[in-house]
Amino acid sequence: MIEMNKRSVLLTGATGGIGRALAERLAGQVDRLILTGRDPEELRIMGASLGAGVQSIHCDLQSPDSIRSLAETITREDACVDTLIHCAGAGSFGEFEHTDDDTIERVIDLNLIAPIKLTRALLPAMLARQQPRLVFVGSALGRLGYPGQAVYCASKAGLHRFAEALRREYFDCELGVLHIAPRATATAFNSLAQQAVNRELKVAEDPPGLVAEKIINAIQRDRNDTVIGFPEKLIARLNQLVPGFFDLALRSHTRAMRRHVSQLSSTGQRQ
């Protein structure tokens, strides 16, 4: 078991839906909590509301210089964190042929490249701490190709394999690498079209507070690989065994996605 009250934690994406819920719970459980995000004022207000032991550092994870500055700030006084929770991310929903280059780059950068770069920047100092832990908040869609989410699925699948490879590469030291995959979560992360599809097809959406509690539980129990929710756990396994079944089963999702994206586009609303 990991004793959270002794941990020094860096949390990315702290002002997002799951990130905010995690920050609110970790603030009362860990020894030191550092929050990062792209909005400095929102971070400042949030950090102040969570009390002593919480520090806020502005960081644009799409900027290599900003990642480098964050790592230097955290390690400057030989006080590097022992737990890094990658929670920042970006989504994209809609037909792939209409996905522009900026969206593709933003999703891949935030979901995959930024966690890789930040991990590389902090890992040497983290390895000097006791029981360092890297925690990657992925997605159940990293294990299941889903209509309307091609780029997002690709980024989260890459993150899952990155975490798995690191775990195997550092098997002979104290480093623990955890990958936690939530299912759909009821936050503003989901576009209007995606929310409409989820309602129509009765796709379960967990409240962010519940997801945050399950993530913390997985960290405490030091579980290497966790999928949150059922039947998502079963679906993730079956998709590896009988992918052809899901090729057929998800056709209704494709039709619903196209319909709702088209409807919102025709009214000029955010998809």
Image (spheres, helix red, strand yellow):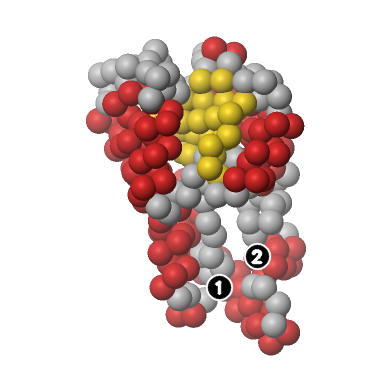
Q: Nearer the viewer, residue 198 or 29?
A: 29
Instruction: Say which mark, if any, is on residue 171.
Output: none
Above or below, comparing residue 24 to residue 101 in the picture: above
Q: Is residue 218 visible?
A: no
Q: Residue furthest bottom?
A: 266
> What residue sits right under mark 1 in the picture?
94
Residue at figure coordinates x 42%, y 54% from the top left: 62
Q: Nearer the viewer, residue 228 or 176?
A: 176
Residue at figure coordinates x 43%, y 37% from the top left: 70
Q: Amino acid at mark 2?
A: Ser
Position in image of residue 167 (x %, y %): 33, 30
Above or below, comparing residue 32 to residue 228 in the picture: above
Position in image of residue 81 (x %, y %): 45, 23
Above or below, comparing residue 140 to residue 146 in the picture: above
- Tell me the distance, in whole angstroms, between the alpha carbons under discs 1 and 2: 10 Å
Position in image of residue 242 (x %, y %): 43, 56
Q: Report if the CB atoms under discs 1 and 2 are less than 8 Å apart.
A: yes
Q: Earlier in the sequence, mark 1 or mark 2?
A: 1
